[in-house]
Image: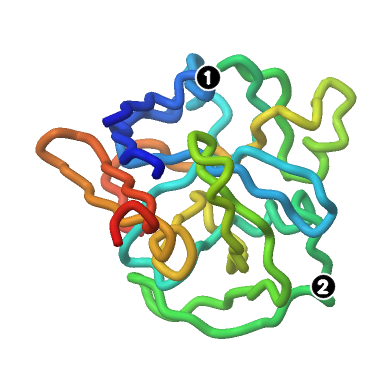
Amino acid sequence: MPEPLLIPYRELGFGGARPYLFLHLTGLDGRGRMIPGLIDSGADSSVLPAGYAPLLGYGRTDLDRVEGTQVGGSVTLLRATRPSTAYVPEFPELAFEMAPFFVHGCQHALWGRADLMRHFDITISERRQECLLVPAESAT
Amino acid sequence: MAVSHQSDLVIREDLTPYAGSWVAVRDGKVVASALDAVELRDTPEVREDDVLMPVPDRTDGVYIL
């Protein structure tokens, strides 16, 4: 049974320690990449800057244009119609599907609820500046 | 309980000079930068296992995403 994992807040080289997490994503082209993102309970699903779409092998025919809502108002999202495969590097055996939304102008990957948080129970402690990831199969 | 700093993925360089660009990071250091992701991926210095990421064009202030 995988143990829970504690990940301290970190900086990404431009200031501000935040709950960043690197995930390994394997896209449609079969290539794997480490991508840093913010753990974001406010995101219904994971969101990636649009530049990651070609890096993960997504072309126009693999993306549906949909409207979404963000804190500043409406936003156009490109929804992946086929999933990538993702895993937390410390848990390579716990891979899960991720069909991300790509957004032009987005400058941070956001790890949301529909994928990462269905497979891990996540507790963020701002006071202790750390995140606790509990694999779902350990939590049940 | 295990604790991970994802230490092999630590970024040891100040990225603020690259604000608004994409960077390729290897062993914590920037090895290349470009204005977009594909241009960066196709840069000869960039390897497949490098971390490619955008650097926000504003790196200070409060984040409300």
Judge whether residue A108 can be spotted in this image: yes
Instruction: Report the residue at 68% width, 72% height from top.
Output: A80
- CA–CA distance between discs 2 and 1? 34 Å
Tell me the quarter of the picture where residue A16 sits.
top left
Label 2 amino acid?
Arg
All told, the count of numbered labels is: 2
- Give the labeled residue for mark 2: A60
In the image, taking residue A20 as reference, residue A32 lies left or right, namely: right
SS category of the residue bearing label 2: helix
In the image, taking residue A59 as reference, residue A122 lies left or right, namely: left
Instruction: Report the residue at 33% width, 46% height from top.
Output: A133
Instruction: Report the residue at 60% width, 52% height from top.
Output: A86
Q: Nearest the camera: A73 or A17?
A: A17
In the image, taking residue A8 as reference, residue A47 lies left or right, namely: right
Tell me the quarter of the picture where residue A58 sits.
bottom right
Name the front one of labels 2 and 1.
Answer: 1
Chain label for disc 2: A
Q: Position of residue A94 (x, y in %)?
A: 53, 50
- Give the labeled residue for mark 1: B8
Instruction: Report the residue at 83% width, 66% height from top.
Output: A59
Q: Position of residue B37 (x, y in %)?
A: 73, 44
Q: Nearest the camera: B48 or B19?
A: B48
- Are the residues flagged by discs 2 and 1 in contact, CB closer than 8 Å? no
Chain label for disc 1: B
